[in-house]
Image (tube, rainbow, N blue to C red):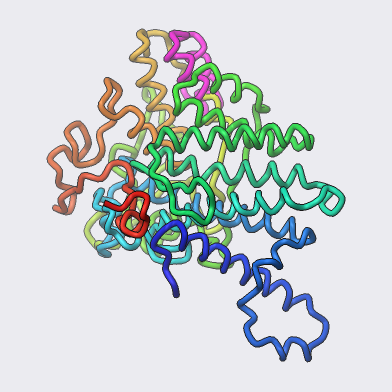
């Protein structure tokens, strides 16, 4: 298999992936069996075939499935890399994910695909980003007459295609994004990538409004609220989050039908099969004012992890290979509003939101004395997000990186203030120093714009 080593090769891989999917579609819908026997290379479809407007929906579906694949890898990797889990693996690759040992030279991190062992991040995210950009360009070329729902499809591609940018902007130290697809990527800071994500969400919002597509409008508003909070646009984050219906949820689907569609957090961590990580002790038996917090329900699995030493604890949020990932949720948006309010000095609004979240799960109320100052309230909101959005969406890693070095610093495992403050885990392994995910060495070396 040809493994891409830079963004141009990712583009070629994405085109081959889509061509293969389309070739299967053509073969299974053909009626003349003699023609089937005459096909010499069913895995190859000329690129110009993709310019057929009848394939518009298929092209959009390919974007969604690629983003779902990449997002699943990011969610799983970000959770294990955060302070919510401890490694429990006898496998070197998976142990490195849990002890902050993933570096720019790690092949699994840089080159792994969704169906591969471990958490391939860079290639799936770049593939999904590339597909979204190039499919959008193809849709633009189709006439409205040939594709009556063209505007809605374009909105869909923009909204889904922004989420790989969210992952790059929130979780990576720097990224390589081409100014024009087919060209080498340009080195971008997290802030620059998040600004691009905001632009894509804004385009999705405008297109969804034109198409009267309420689902994609709510999806894009939710995503832009998240990005605006990252960028410090607190008023804009509140405005976007407040426009979305209170019960709106958007899911990235998973399935047990194919390894590429598995929920890999279940496959590698939360299912009884591999047990490469265990819920960290600081996330077990959580309480609020003496009441058990049902938002993080953790159970001892009755056995050790894959290292045969670390007791394996699992949680109840991901229960099978087909458990979907939430792209956005009411709880996420309410916590966006609460954080923005607290950071602007509106503690009353933040208190009200936290009380609503507690009431929804039967926890005692948050009193003014529980967070009397602005700093106290911000710290409490970070802990509430840790619990409400446990093991999903990369939210904990994002908070650890956003507030790193500030008065609200959340230490990574192995750092002072963590459950392993001396740099050694429960099995005697030394932690690495990875915080944000690095740009892979292969991308840096293979890209003339950024190679040193």
**In the image, what residue occupies the spot 41% across and 8% down?**
368
Which picture quadrant has residue 245?
A: top right
Which region of the structure is painted magenta? 335-363
**In the image, what residue occupies the spot 36% across and 33% down?**
286
Q: Nearer the viewer, residue 143 or 374?
A: 143
Q: Nearer the viewer, residue 412 or 359?
A: 412
Which picture quadrant has residue 296?
A: top left
**In the image, what residue occupies the spot 82% across and 86% down?**
32
Q: Is residue 412 left or right of residue 12?
A: left
Q: Is residue 298 left or right of residue 22?
A: left
Residue 293 can be seen, yes or no: yes
**In the image, what residue occupies the spot 39% across and 15% down?**
377
Secondary structure mainly formed by the magenta segment:
helix
Q: How far across and how far down the image is residue 264, in percent?
A: 45, 57
Let me know if residue 351 is in the magenta part. yes
Residue 305 can be seen, yes or no: no
Counting the numbered discs, the total is: 0
Q: Nearer the viewer, residue 273 or 111?
A: 111
Q: How far across and how far down the image is residue 375, in percent?
A: 34, 14
Q: Nearer the viewer, residue 264 or 106?
A: 106
Q: With respect to residue 41, does 172 lie above or below?
A: above
Quarter of the N terminus within the rendering: bottom left
Let me know if residue 452 is in the magenta part. no
Q: How far across and how far down the image is residue 395, in percent?
A: 43, 36
Q: Residue lying furthest right in this view?
A: 145
Q: Is residue 146 left or right of residue 7?
A: right
Q: How far across and how far down the image is residue 307, in percent?
A: 25, 62
């Amino acid at each position: 298999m040809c493994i891409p080593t830079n963004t141009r090769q990712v583009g070629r891989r994405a085109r081959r992936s889509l061509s293969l999917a389309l070739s299967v579609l053509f073969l299974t819908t053909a009626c003349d069996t003699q023609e089937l026997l005459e096909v010499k290379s069913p895995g190859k479809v000329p690129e110009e075939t993709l310019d057929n407007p009848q394939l518009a929906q298929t092209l959009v579906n390919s974007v969604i499935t690629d983003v779902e694949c990449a997002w699943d890898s990011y969610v799983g990797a970000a959770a294990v890399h955060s302070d919510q889990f401890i490694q429990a693996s006898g496998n070197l690759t998976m142990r490195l994910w849990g002890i902050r040992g993933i570096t720019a030279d790690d092949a699994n991190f840089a080159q792994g695909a969704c169906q591969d062992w471990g958490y391939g991040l860079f290639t799936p995210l770049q593939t999904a980003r590339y597909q979204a950009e190039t499919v959008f360009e193809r849709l633009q070329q189709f006439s409205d007459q040939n594709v009556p729902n063209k505007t809605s499809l374009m909105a869909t591609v923009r909204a889904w295609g922004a989420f790989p940018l969210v992952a790059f902007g929130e979780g990576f130290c720097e990224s390589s994004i081409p100014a024009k697809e087919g060209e080498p990527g340009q080195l971008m800071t997290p802030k620059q990538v998040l600004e691009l994500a905001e632009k894509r969400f804004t385009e999705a919002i405008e297109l969804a409004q034109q198409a009267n597509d309420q689902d994609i409008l709510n999806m894009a508003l939710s995503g832009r609220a998240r990005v605006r909070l990252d960028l410090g646009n607190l008023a804009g984050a509140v405005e976007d989050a407040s426009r979305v219906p209170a019960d709106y949820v958007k899911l990235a689907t998973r399935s047990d039908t194919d390894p590429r569609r598995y929920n890999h957090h279940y496959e590698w961590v939360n299912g009884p099969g591999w047990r490469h990580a265990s819920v960290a002790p600081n996330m077990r038996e959580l309480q609020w004012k003496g009441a058990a917090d049902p938002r993080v329900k953790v159970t001892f699995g009755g056995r050790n992890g894959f290292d045969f030493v670390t007791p394996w604890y699992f949680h109840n949020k991901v229960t099978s290979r087909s458990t979907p990932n939430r792209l956005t949720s009411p709880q996420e948006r309410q916590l966006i509003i609460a954080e923005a309010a607290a950071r602007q000095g509106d503690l009353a609004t933040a208190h009200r939101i936290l009380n609503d979240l507690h009431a929804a799960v039967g926890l005692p109320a948050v009193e003014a004395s529980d967070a009397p100052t602005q700093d106290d309230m911000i710290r409490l909101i970070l802990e509430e997000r840790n619990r409400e959005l446990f093991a999903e969406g990369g939210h904990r890693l994002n908070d650890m990186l956003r507030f790193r070095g500030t008065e609200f610093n959340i230490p990574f495992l192995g750092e002072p203030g963590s459950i392993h403050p001396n740099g050694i885990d429960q099995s005697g392994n030394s932690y690495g120093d990875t915080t944000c995910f690095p740009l892979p060495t292969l991308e840096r070396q293979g890209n003339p714009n950024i190679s040193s």
